[in-house]
Image (spheres, rainbow, N blue to C red):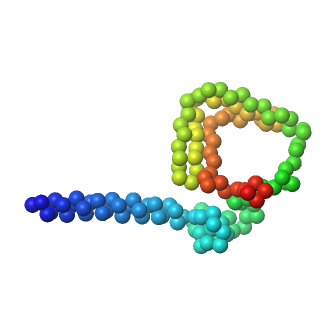
Amino acid sequence: MILPTYLNFFSVLLLLLILYFSSVLASEAEFSYAKGTSNGPENWWHLNPKWKVCQYGKLQSPIDLRDRWVKVLPQLGELQKVYKPAPAVLKNMGHYITVRWNGDAGQLRINGNYYKLIQFHWHTPSEHTLNGL
C-alpha cells in the first residue's frame, strides 16, 4: 500500500510543477522588450489580437524620451497638488506595479482641471529610456 500512496503523491507533485512552470514560461513568452526577437517590440502587433493596432503606431512603447522634445508651456501654470494620507493597496502584477487608494487621497490641478488620485501604475522593466539610457 505504500507504493500507490507515493505514486499518487509524486504524480500530484509533478502535475503541480508542470502547471507552475508552464504558467511561468507562458507569461515570460508573451512579449519581450528585446529588439530583434520573435516577441520583441517590432512584433508585438501579431502576438495578441488586441495589439493589432501596434503595427501602425509611430510612438508606442518603448519610446526614447529626449530632452530636445521637452516643451515648456507657461500658460499651463504650475502643477497644483493636494495630497492627503489615505489607505492604499500596492500590488506587483508581474509586468507592472500598481497602487490603488481607498478613500480620498487628494487631487492634482492641471490647466484648470482637477484629477482625483485613484490609481497609479508603472511598468517594470521600464518601457522607455531617457536620452538613450
User: Which x, y percent locates residue 21?
Assistant: 41, 62
Q: Residue furthest front?
A: 133
Figure quadrant of residue 33: bottom right
Name which residue lies at 9% across and 60% down.
1
User: Which x, y percent locates residue 62?
Assistant: 70, 60
Whether residue 123 sits left or right of residue 78 in the image: it is left
Location of residue 97 with respect to 116 vertically, above or below: below
Q: Residue furthest right?
A: 74
Can residue 45 be seen here? The reply is: no
Asked whether 16 or 108 is in front, the reply is 16
Q: Quadrant of the C terminus?
A: bottom right
Figure quadrant of residue 52: bottom right
Whether residue 72 sits left or right of residue 103 in the image: it is right
Location of residue 122 with respect to 63 vertically, above or below: above
Name which residue lies at 62% across and 36% down.
118
Name which residue lies at 84% across and 52% down.
67
Asked whether 82 or 103 is in front, the reply is 82
Whether residue 20 sits left or right of residue 63 in the image: it is left
Number of numbered markers: 0
User: Which x, y percent locates residue 66?
Assistant: 81, 55
Name which residue lies at 35% across and 61% down.
17
Location of residue 76 with respect to 39 vertically, above or below: above
Can residue 75 be seen here? The reply is: yes
Figure quadrant of residue 99: top right
